[in-house]
Amino acid sequence: MTKTQNATQNISVPNHNLEVLRKHFSHCFDKNGDFDFEKFKKELATHEINFSKEGYGMDWLGKSYARLLASDPARTLLKEDKEWNKKPENKNSDNLLIKGDNLEVLKHLSNAYHEQVKMIYIDPPYNTGSDGFVYQDDRKFTVEEFQKLAGVDEEKAKKILSFINSKSNSHSAWLTFMYPRIYIAKQLLRDDGVIFVSIDDNEVAQLRILMDEIFGEESFVGNIAWESKTKSQNTKDSFNKLQPKVEYILLYTKKDQRRFNLIQKGEKQYPLNDDRGEYRDYPLEVMNADGMRGRESMIFEIEGISPPQGKQWKLGQDTISIYKSRGDLFVRDGKIVLKMRPDDEKSELTEPFWWLLNKEIGTAESAKKELSTVLENNKHGFETVKPTNLIKRLVFHSATTNDLILDFFAGSGTTGDAVMQLNAEDAANGKGGKRKYILVQLPETIDPIKNKTAYDYVKNELGIAEPTIFEITKERLVKAGKKIADTSGFKIFETQPIWEDYEFEAEEFNSQATLFDESKLSAEGVKTLLTTWKTFDNIPLTQDLQEIDFGGYSGYYGNEKLYLMDVGFNTGNLKKLLEEIDNNPVFNPTIIIVFGYHFESKSLREISENISLYANKKSIDIDFITRY
């Protein structure tokens, strides 16, 4: 199959729900590809499904704009920091630190990392009025464009666009900012994934309803409260308000699977091992059969053994059946013994109030000191830092030793530090410890007047000419890793704007078309395009492409995709490519993607025809894509 793609300007979050509908209800789409909802309802009605009439939900000025942002294509490319990533400690790393607007980054990640993330933790701006949050989007829509894209009338389009450009910090502005980011983040979570969102009194009510809308009310697990301050702060209106000392962490699951590891490290040990993993022996206990918890159903025979008179088993028949079915129940000395595994000791419920644990977890105040210590007693200027132990506890409860954790409001990098510390503790206990992280941080400029401490640290201590928060994030990860002898490293990527005048609208490129001056592209620019495309094609950022020589011309290969990006491809290179397909056992491309601006139309036709007509020895069906 041969086709032309304008992928560079169409990187957006794939609608997997629509794909499911097309697969299972293809007859509900008309000839134009539009979904016929009334026909769909009739189809479901035959199965006696009732449609909810309840209209409860949240609306705000800018909601249609927020939905548009969630589906609007990315306006950036992904560039690799090759010098950093080639360092010995980073070149094989599975950890990522990405510099850029997190909305853009999430869109770039939406293919390669779709349903790959086990846990998300974010600490977004709280919109307190003093945290610097001001929403003004840099996307520019005309009234007519926005009308068409958002499906609103002219008057509402004008009102929304005026609001978006007003530098607002209202509840509506905050919701418009948060909605697309959380919406896309949900697509990255595994089915058993969880998301934790930090917040305070100012936006907790709005956040709860927003999360309900995106994840569903049934996916709400709980609201963790932790004591972030040990001292109340006197403010101008403190005389008529309670002074907050508590912050919150809302917890939602992807698909309502509310099982978390609630055993604190060191509380339970699993000294035994078999082919299913580690476990401990648990003699099945009994309890009194009278009182509020007494139940006839808990009195039954297990392997010929019944509970004593007046007693009942602590576990019911369904649970016992699970242990029996997997061979984890046996009799020893006349007693029922279970093989209790770590996953068995999980529960739906945990203590939601964490103020009594502040000595163990820490506070925002202690976290500032902790960060200063990590940065080797340098002052950093952060006023709102989360304690590492707080994030460690969240990670421990929800992510096992090989899971991927995402934080797209990275701040000082606490989440990355927490992941490294947990991995080090697991490794010391012989439990592996290979959790991976993706952190995203905006290169937010540090104001030399408002935050002189941080500005001076980055400029003078780190030697950065234009100080940004990103540099503190990066430095914290480096120093935190050295502190615990962590050698996992991390790779760095950043977003950059798509090149000016980069447009492709013609049905077929030809040498007369003056769509884009490809001579503007340096070798580095072509590699940036390749990095962006491979991520679009479901290849993780941390996975390097293999460079293959086709008689003096280099192609880039990974996940059965071959990229031909450079100028100068000729008939001899094509011959060598076909020979490589036949003779190289690990080279099996099912898709060949070429950068159209670097190939003449004649050359494109020649490659396409030869690929489609060539009967390769492996009988591989190869698609040919010209991409711009």
Image (cartoon, grey):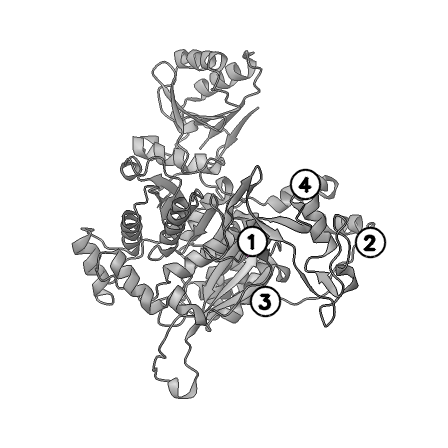
Q: CA distance from mark 2 to mark 1?
A: 36 Å
- Number of other residues with Cα within 10 Å of mark 3, as a class: few under 14, some 14 to 19, many 20 or more: few
Q: Is residue 391 inside the magenta stretch?
A: no
Disc nearest the viewer among 2 and 1 = 2
Residue 232 in picture, x, y percent from top left: 36, 79
Name the front one of labels 1 and 3.
3
Secondary structure of the magenta portion, mostly?
Answer: helix
Looking at the picture, how far across and down is residue 467, in whole percent?
A: 24, 55
Q: Give the residue pinned by disc 4.
A: 22
Comparing labels 2 and 3, the label whose residue is closer to the camera:
2
Q: Earlier in the sequence, mark 4 or mark 3?
A: 4
Q: Quarter-wise, where is residue 597 in the image?
A: top left
* SS at badge 3: loop
Amino acid marked by disc 4:
Arg
Residue at 76%, 63% (x, y): give it: 309
Hey, which residue is sitting farthest bottom in the picture?
A: 239
Report the residue marked by disc 3. 58
Q: Is residue 42 above or below residue 552?
A: below
Please provide percent x and percent y for residue 575: 44, 11
Distance from disc 4 to disc 3, alpha carbons, whole Å, reads 29 Å
The residue nearer to you, when weighing 171 against 461, is 461
**In front of the other: 419 or 155:** 419
Picture quarter with the C terminus: top left
Q: Is residue 549 left or right of residue 56?
A: left
Q: Which residues are magenta?
A: 147-151
Per the image, the residue denoted by label 1 is 148
Tag of residue 48: 2
Q: Position of residue 577 (x, y in %)?
A: 44, 15
On the picture, is 16 further left or further right than 406?
Answer: right
Instruction: Tell me which label, 2 or 4, sits earlier in the chain.
Output: 4
